[in-house]
Image (cartoon, grey):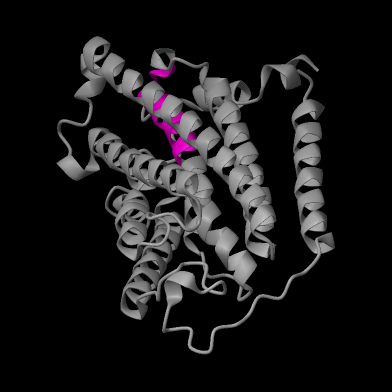
Amino acid sequence: MSPSRPMAILRALFLVLLLAFSVVEAAPKKTLPRPSDPFADPKHDPYNPLRYIASNVLTAIAFALVLLVAIIQTVLVRKFGAKFMLSMIIGAYTFAFGIYIIEYLFVVLSPCAFIASEYVLLGRLARYLNCDKHLMVNPRRITIVFISSDITTFLVQAAGGSVSISSNTLSLAKVGSNIFLAGLVMQLASFLTFTCIFTVFIYRVRTQEPEVWAMHASKKWHQSWLALAGAMTFSFVGILIRSTYRVAELSQGYEGYLATTERFFYGLDTLPLFIAISIYVFFWPGRIIGNGMPPTATPVMKEQSSIDSVPTEQKET
């Protein structure tokens, strides 16, 4: 596959997204009757997409905690490095714009940024341990393949979310919901596959590389690469819980039991994702594995590693 092929695919996906926006704008607008008291019957209020009155206290707490994690991780990047984790930090700033549609997309799409960091982190960990051979996918391909998958599911979800929240008709909102659901299912399947690759990798290192497994035995437990692997496991579980919940929620529709019950949103979406990103505050990759180079790497090895990170197609050209 030529290097221009992925860019052509991305351009096509962006055109699909723009087309979705144009369809929404061209759709006939229908004015719905406004209730005299929005607090009287929120479950049947057409202007209340949540179908409940959100708790200001819970929202403020969640907002403050995520903001705190984002600030701490920004400081950690500046102090310890690991710039490959920047996508997680950017995803944590879900309040960057004041327009509702953009805010909504940042909220529902921010896990794509978290997942992108996980994809890169596994490759860096394998390189740091010098155990690339234990990955089920070629180390030079694993980041490219799964990041491409993440971008694709991101664009699909963005298109579906844009159509859904911008529509004034139930039929068009349903179309957007189905597109968004398809993106969520694709994302869940991709991340499940990635989690299996991570699990097999850890198992192979444990059974076939006892020296590597114990290489940080002299360090404090929280400075060991095993602690980072444990943090990754907690993070993976949090993302999987959230992804599964979102798939189930969208399957029921925007007026389903899961979508209209606030405690499920905080318990199965907000909390798991908060754990998935905040765990790295205590086990920051840059503090444990640096930028992913083996601790005994020589300048020649570093140069070779940078060459190996270039896709094969680019080398041949």
Front residue of this view, candidates 224 and 88: 88
Front residue of this view, candidates 230 and 10: 10
Q: Is residue 80 left or right of residue 315?
A: left
Give the residues in magenta.
118-132
Instruction: Locate the C terminus by quadrant.
Output: top right
- The image quadrant of residue 244 is top left
Q: Is residue 126 magenta?
A: yes
Q: Say whether residue 304 is visible.
A: no
Q: Position of residue 16 (x, y in %)?
A: 78, 44
Q: Is residue 31 magenta?
A: no
Task: Give me the residue at 60% from left, 71% from top.
Answer: 100
The total number of labels drawn is 0
- The image quadrant of residue 5 is top right
Q: Is residue 64 left or right of residue 8?
A: left
Task: Give me the residue at 35% from left, 39% from top.
Answer: 236
Q: Is residue 86 left or right of residue 156?
A: left
